[in-house]
Image: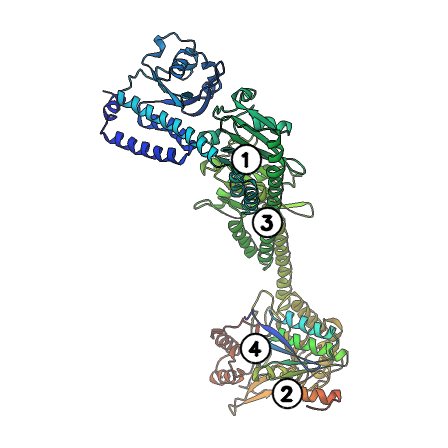
Amino acid sequence: MDADTQFNVMMRGSVPVVQIIGDLDHYSTPEFRSVISELIQQGHKTIIVDMSAADFMDSSGMSGIIFAAKRLSAIDGHLSLANCNLRTTRKLSIGGLTKMPDLMILYPSVEEALEHVREIQGKPST
Amino acid sequence: MDRREQLVGAISPGSKSALELLGFLQHLSQDTAEGNLARVVDAAVELPVKHLRVDKSVLLCCPAPGKSYFPLAFRNVSHPFLENCHLLSGDDILDWAAINQSLKVVDDLPSLSTPSAGIYALEHVRSLACIPVVAQGETLAVLLYMCCSPVSFTIWELEVMNTIANHVAAVSRLKQADEERTPPQIGPLLVRLREALWTSTDLDELLNRTLREALTLMQADSGSIILHEARGCRVAATYGLSESISRELHRVKDTVYAHVIASQKPVLLHGAADAQEYPGAIPRPEIVSAMSVPLRGRRSLLGVLNINRSRAGRIFNDADLAFATSHIAQPLVMTIENLKLHEATKAQTRYLRDMYEIARTITSTLELDAVLNMIMNRLRALIVSDVCGLLLYDNETGRLNVACGYGIPDGTESDYAELMMIAGKLSPSRMRPLVIPDLSAHHLYRHPPAAEKLGLRSAVTVPLTIKRKRVGFLTAYRHEPRGFPRETVKLLIGMAELAAIAIENARLYERQLGIANLTQRLLSPSAIEPIPGFEVGCKYAPAYQVGGDYYDLIELDRHRFAIVIADVAGKDVSAARHIAMCKHSLRATAEHIASPAELLHKMNRLIYDNTEPEAFISMFYAILDTESKTLLYSLAGHEPGLLLRAHTGRIEYISTPGILLGVLPNATFFERRTSIKVGDILLLYTDGLTTALSSDGDTGLSKLESALMERPSKTAQELANNIHKLATSRRTSRPPDDIAIVALKGV
């Protein structure tokens, strides 16, 4: 149990990148959900979640990711997950979530996620 | 030879006691040189009682001819004596000593017929020595040293008494000369007074400093500030007064300041003549002029400022009084009120901080035992109490039971119950706390035996209420009487309110959890029905009281059995609700749907429409045909089944692509068929198992495969048990997850 999971939100241009530092589990998922809700409330339709420092994700954590994906999908938005580790990728893959581009797309890095997002938004890549 | 006679022998020049006495006399000389009138006067009555054969002493100031004597300082004399000192005027012995300015000794007082015999009899005086205090040819006072047995003072003792009298005379002269030498400059002194008013946030310290500056400003040599507080009058600051006077100041009735408090008007006094109007006052004839100024606050009287001057010839007038009122009393009132406001604000902040801390701690958990433990810990930290206990009503029996407590050494539940039953005697409608300042004097709770045994003197009990209903009591005891001041009771009330809510929440949560547990017990298969030609082994281990995994076996017809294993997101009551929904829907529909993919499609829609947006379920659903020995299966975001083939010794993954149930409204699912022959083992499980076996860089699947391959000869149940044991024996820092395992073996 890591009660001290942190959620850092950094703006990359107009796209918010939520970095999860610690475990995404039963204890930290409620906060993750409120971070996502707040960003959506601020008008963001595209959110990148950086999982590079998220060591572990349980089924509660996965419900948080599904929550974010569904909320964004409902407003024609998009969720990108970057830097998922092997265990997380496997979990998402078994859940059948990696083959649903309307819900979420996994990227090997934040940069690649950003690049794709900019393409979707029709802005020139920098 | 009695002890007193031994002492007589000891107190002679050169003895140890005499040397000690000489040491004190040396201090006295120093005090005299420094002009410390208060200390010299105090020593004048103290030293002979301690070091000579004197039992009682009093320093009586000499009045003007025809006026009464006033005690200035005293030791071991009673109030009746002090109150009747004025009757000593005309006493042969005192008058003789004062007028002749010579010491007078009486060895056997009862044998003399003196008009004041009755007063001396009050103190059982048998012999005495009377020494005049003479300065510049004028008798200022008389030192009266009294003994309760017939004593003949030695020359040496009388010499010591005389020396003391000379010191008193000398210090009176010194003070007078000093004051006349340096006329004060009012401007800078006023600045110093203003500065003193801002020097401290400690009320008494500030008043003492201010009083000193005020006395300098008014060219006065002694004074006091008496505060009129809720519990009575209190001497907050004194200067230039002997200790005995300072101590007695606020106790005596009919004093000048008592008059000022009653009338709220200032009083000017000139000499002893005016002082006689206030018979309760402790007479101090050295004071030639005095003023008592009321300290009037915005709403009430805060106290009295007393200023005394003992310099002959210079008396206070109305102008002085007006000056003291406007330049000292008024700024002083403002400062006292500000400080009281500051104190009140500080106390309120402290209260709020404590309440926040209590709320934060006791609402951080929903487990009743933990909540009770935290309440006790906060009580220990914030409230000074020697014994404390919490009583709660049993919801079913309505009886009051001890929930927790501390403070009774090796105390059992019945010890606490006996002590806490003070609460049980309260009227059922009482919602307010009951404070018992002194158990030995209370009409209803006098000397409860348990409290008396522990030496407890004061108590408080606060009802815990929810929506005007009492749920319990918080009771605390202290060894001291009046051990629970108003602030403590206020904090206890706040704490009781929060504790009641936290306890009620924990009880509700326990009830809810109980329902969820019951639900899950009803949901889990109690026993697996045997399947012809197959062995089935199952293991279910929820990580918490309510689990999120489940499995089931449903007989569809004589040779077809549905096998299902699922994992619901979350580990709370809503997870149990989702499982219930899943299980009943499956049982109702399974026999009508021959296709696992179609069944999952229908389940997906059901879950999508009837749960929260973030809810999902992973599921493995299969139909086992015992005749054809085939398995038709479909997966919805679930871990792949592992099928160990007996004839090859290799493992096949049993899986189909498919998203978790409840994520998308129109998800598509696929199905496949495989055979299960004799000796083949199918292992189905939830992700709690792979998570428990995983480590950094490893999904846990390879460990599971190895475990399966190592134990093919075991029964299905042994296999399920062994794999579960393997997973739970690993040390991990992560919280455990639910684990469900179903093993199926062809036989």
The disc, 2 or 4, on the residue closer to the chain's N-terminal end is: 4
Instruction: Say few, some or many: other residues with alpha carbon within 10 Å of mark 2 (under 14 / 14 to 19 / 20 or more).
Output: few
Q: Is residue B213 visible?
A: yes
Instruction: Check the residue under mark 1 and report the chain it is in.
Output: B
Same subunit, labels 1 and 3: the answer reads yes
Are the numbered discs 1 and 2 placed on the same chain, yes or no?
no
- The residue tagged 1 is B218
Q: Amino acid at mark 3?
A: Lys
Q: Is residue B180 left or right of residue B134?
A: right
Name the element at disc 3.
Answer: helix
Amino acid type, label 4: Phe
Q: Nearer the observer, disc 1 or disc 4?
A: 1
In this view, the residue in front, B332 or B176, is B176
**Hey, what amino acid is under mark 2?**
Glu
Frontmost residue, B414 versus B333 = B333
In the drawing, what numbered circle is on residue B358? none
How far across and how far down the image is residue B706, in percent? 49, 85
Name the chain letter of the residue that bears numbered label 4: A
Q: Nearer the viewer, residue B595 or B336?
A: B336
Q: Within 10 angstroms of label 4, few (less than 14), some, or many (20 or more) residues?
A: many
Residue B591 can be seen, yes or no: no
Q: Which residue is mark 4?
A: A56
Which marked residue is nearer to the observer: mark 1 or mark 3?
Answer: 1
Q: CA distance from mark 2 to mark 3?
A: 54 Å
Badge 1: how crowded within 10 Å, few (<14), some, or many (20+)?
A: many
Residue B509, picture quadrant: bottom right
Foreground tag (1 vs 2): 1
Quarter of the figure with the C terminus of chain B:
bottom right
Q: Which residue is mark 2?
A: A111
Please state which amino acid type lies under the numbered disc 1. Answer: Met
